[in-house]
């Protein structure tokens, strides 16, 4: 099995995107020479059918960030193929429609998202549309939201497809989760359909989805929200709960959320508390969480499969691979530590999983 590891290259020794690989079940190793230079490649996704990977280049200064597409060669290695401007500052999240025709690019500092057309071969089309949330932020502030020090502007932290025609946007700056629909005939035009307004100061960051439910993690309030997304229903907050263990003191901000269908449960990473938590679900009820530490300083993105957890801990320059036991819990006796500078994203490769000698 093979993974690409996205990193921050600014103010670190990172060489870009790293490759780690498991050979014959003997644990993972970093392929020291298998790196792809891309500045601040903080989020990566794989094409649903083609041997292609899309990656952001998270840049805050003008003229802004970029998005790259990596293409696999005959040896199974990835290299840069195309790079285009992302359309804003600090692109931090990507989502590709299941049909592979529209790429969503979220811009944290610009408070916007871009709809980027994708050709049949997976390359970038010239068509791109930018949707800004500046006006939404002004309205939110007028209504008493967006008062946290980090909410001085709109901050689109993610835009995530739930099918070919709908996607959900988390705006940390406006405390909103928004459902957009794509135009039936134009892959880069969208209309707002629904809006969930979270409590002031929540700061929604990322979404996990399951049928008619959305699970939003709020970075600033360290809260998980269960949102109803029935086709003809109102945008309702069904339930919520803290994603921090009891008696957690000091600074902490939630980072990633993933839905574990085999439990069912939600997993969340917390920076500051520096651990992962598992929150079981009973219908729409969030049950008491269980927490684990020992995943490193500033655990950010993680990959969750039936067999393992792979966690990127940015501040101690380590990726940890942890087996899951028969109950789906982390086996902390199995932790393997891989040294990678400033890792922030874990991408398992379906198309890159070839036998190696």
Image: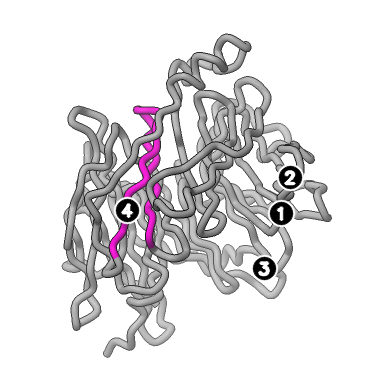
Q: Earlier in the sequence, mark 1 or mark 2?
A: 1
Identify the mark nearer the N-term, 4 or 2: 4
- Disc 4 element: strand
| Relative to 314, 139 lies left or right | right
Q: Quadrant of residue 6?
A: bottom left
Number of marks: 4
> Please, what is the dominant secondary structure of the magenta stretch?
strand
Q: Secondary structure at mark 3?
A: loop
- Which is more toward the observer, 38 or 234? 234
Label pair 1/2, CB-CB below 8 angstroms = yes
The numbered mark, 2 or 3, whose residue comes first in the sequence reads 2
The residue positioned 59% from the left and 30% from the top of the image is 176
Residue 248 x, y percent position in the rendering: 66, 32
Q: Which residue is mark 3?
A: 328
The label nearer to you, 2 versus 3, is: 2
- Dividing the picture into quadrants, the one containing residue 71 is bottom left
Instruction: Tell us which disc is closer to us: 1 or 4.
Output: 4
Task: Compute the Cα span from label 3 to label 1.
Answer: 24 Å
Q: Which residues are magenta?
A: 101-119
> Pointers 1 and 4 in contact (CB under 8 A)?
no
> Mark 3 or mark 4, which is nearer the start of the sequence?
4
Mark 4 = which residue? 117
Which residue in the rendered view is the most extreme toward the front?
Answer: 185
**Residue on which disc 1 sits:** 212
The Cα atoms of the two marked residues, 1 and 2, are separated by 6 Å
Q: CA distance from mark 2 to mark 3?
A: 27 Å
Question: Is residue 22 magenta-colored?
Answer: no
């Amino acid at each position: 099995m093979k993974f690409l590891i996205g990193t921050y290259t600014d103010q670190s020794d990172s060489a870009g995107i790293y490759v780690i690989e498991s050979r014959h079940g003997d644990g993972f190793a970093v392929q020291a020479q298998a790196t792809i230079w891309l500045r601040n490649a903080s989020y990566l996704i794989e094409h649903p059918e083609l041997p292609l990977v899309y990656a952001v280049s998270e840049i805050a200064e003008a003229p802004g960030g970029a998005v790259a597409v990596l293409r696999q060669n005959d040896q199974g290695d990835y290299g840069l193929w195309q790079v285009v401007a992302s359309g804003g500052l600090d692109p931090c999240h990507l989502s590709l429609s299941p049909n592979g025709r529209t790429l969503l690019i979220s811009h944290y500092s610009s408070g916007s998202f871009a709809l980027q057309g994708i050709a049949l071969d997976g390359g970038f089309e010239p068509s791109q549309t930018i949707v800004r949330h500046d006006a939404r932020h002004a309205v939110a502030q007028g209504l008493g939201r967006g008062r946290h020090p980090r909410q001085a502007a709109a901050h689109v932290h993610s835009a995530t497809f739930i099918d070919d025609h709908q996607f959900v946007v988390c705006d940390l700056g406006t405390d909103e989760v928004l459902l957009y629909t794509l135009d039936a005939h134009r892959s880069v035009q969208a209309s707002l359909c629904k809006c969930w307004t979270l409590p002031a100061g929540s700061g929604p960051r990322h979404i996990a989805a399951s049928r008619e439910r959305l699970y939003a993690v709020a970075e600033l309030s360290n809260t998980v929200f269960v949102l109803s997304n029935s086709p003809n229903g109102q945008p309702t907050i069904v339930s919520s709960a803290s994603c921090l263990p009891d008696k957690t003191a000091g600074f902490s901000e939630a980072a990633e959320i993933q839905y574990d269908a085999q439990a069912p449960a939600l997993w969340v990473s917390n920076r500051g508390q520096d651990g992962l938590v598992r929150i079981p679900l009973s219908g729409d009820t969030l049950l008491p969480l269980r927490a684990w530490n020992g995943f490193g300083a500033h655990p950010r993105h993680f990959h969750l499969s039936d067999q393992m957890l792979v966690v990127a801990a940015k501040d101690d320059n380590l990726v940890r691979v942890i087996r899951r036991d028969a109950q789906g819990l982390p086996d902390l006796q199995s932790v393997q530590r891989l040294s990678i500078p400033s890792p922030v994203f874990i991408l398992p490769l379906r198309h890159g999983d070839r036998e190696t000698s």
